[in-house]
Image: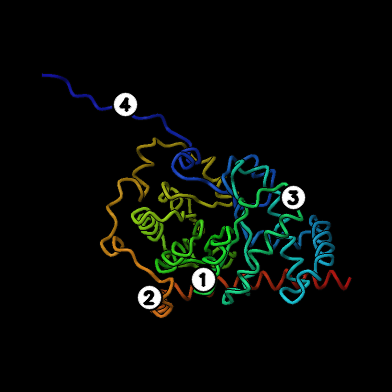
Amino acid sequence: MATITSAPASKPVNLLDYLRSKTSVDIDCLDVKAATELGPFTDYNTQWEASMQLSDPRNAALLGQSMGLARELQAEHEGSVTFEELAVEIAMISLSLRMIPVISATGAIHVMCNPLYSWDTDKVFKTGHRFHKLCRVLDPDFDRSRLIMKVPSTWEGLQACRKLKADGIKTLATTLFTMEQAILAGEAGCTSISPFAHELRAHLGTPYHDIEPILSLYLAAQQYFRHHAIPTKIKSCGFTTAEEIMSMAGVDAMTLPAEQLEELRVAPAEPPESLDKRSVFHGAAPILDKDAVRRSYMDDKVGFDRAYCTNGRGRAKTEDSIAVFCGFQIQAEELVRTSELN
């Protein structure tokens, strides 16, 4: 009788290397040195750190230059944006452009639309075009197809994304917590969506804990998009543990801050077969029956509102996250206002 031998165990692999073999990894960090050490990365994608960076004394010169350019361009944008808003937009784009050397040659930078515009389709639409104009002024050689504007996933914001798509301007749907928002973002032609695993307040250094993370949305949305040949990609973010991160290996893309990347880099190596078993994408069940049928909300606001508002705490999480981002925006504008007076 032949002897049956088991296959030899595979060589253990570094967790970060394994993740990169399954998922496109983006950097959520404005520290070029740290990003260089932890790279390579596909895209740059952050928001709250960019807001906080403006108050860092090391960026005083950048803020001053942004304010100077805003004064020069204010007349051109009179009536559509205030001086403070324009200066913040210029500063945010300038900070993002710094990260170009640490992302791939075709990678994108993501800059968030003013969250105070979340419920104003026209203002979001105009901001998308203004971002492209500002980017051309700041770096004429930068390929603006690599600029993606982050838009809150409200009905009004995603309607603007549809209009911007028609004009060749790329968008990412952020503050997204429900399948209805994902479906609408796909219909609007968003390049990607960025569902937060945990609501934003869980990441602000407070004791708050999100007891209803949306980890299941990543697989459901990715299966839905692929089943219906929708090109929108999933950029997962907002994880709180390494275990959550590794359970999502196989999602289209993942945005991680430097501290989580370092945690994965120094963690003990594991056999790839063991890591495969930890991912919900490995050997995933077929798409759910309810998602095998294509749904549409693009021209059905009532239907969208009804489904979105009754999907757990999705709406509450979205609006609370927008409120947090609005707080950052107000602080940034106040910084510009105070600096102008000084």
Residue positioned 42% across, 47% down in the render: 249
Of 120 and 98, nearer the camera is: 120
Are there few (<14), some (14-19), or many (20+) residues within 10 Å of tag 1? Answer: many
Front of the two marks 2 and 1: 1
What secondary structure is found at the residue carrying circle 1? helix
Residue positioned 43% across, 48% down in the render: 246
Give the total number of marks visible in the rendering.
Answer: 4
The answer to which quarter of the image holds residue 104 is top right
Q: Which residue is mark 4?
A: 8
The answer to which quarter of the image holds residue 277 is top left
Q: Which residue is mark 3?
A: 140
Instruction: Name which of mark 2 and mark 1 comes first in the sequence.
Output: 1
Q: Label 2 sits on what residue type?
A: Ala
Q: CA distance from mark 2 to mark 1?
A: 17 Å
Residue 330 picture location, percent across and down:
70, 73
Residue contact at pointers 2 and 1, CB within 8 angstroms: no
Q: CA distance from mark 4 to mark 3?
A: 55 Å
Of 230 and 54, nearer the camera is: 230
Q: Which residue is mark 2?
A: 307
What secondary structure is found at the residue carrying circle 2? helix
Q: Is there any visible trace of residue 240 in the rendered image?
A: no
Q: CA distance from mark 3 to mark 1?
A: 29 Å
Q: CA distance from mark 3 to mark 2?
A: 44 Å
Are there few (<14), some (14-19), or many (20+) residues within 10 Å of tag 3? Answer: few
What secondary structure is found at the residue carrying circle 4? loop
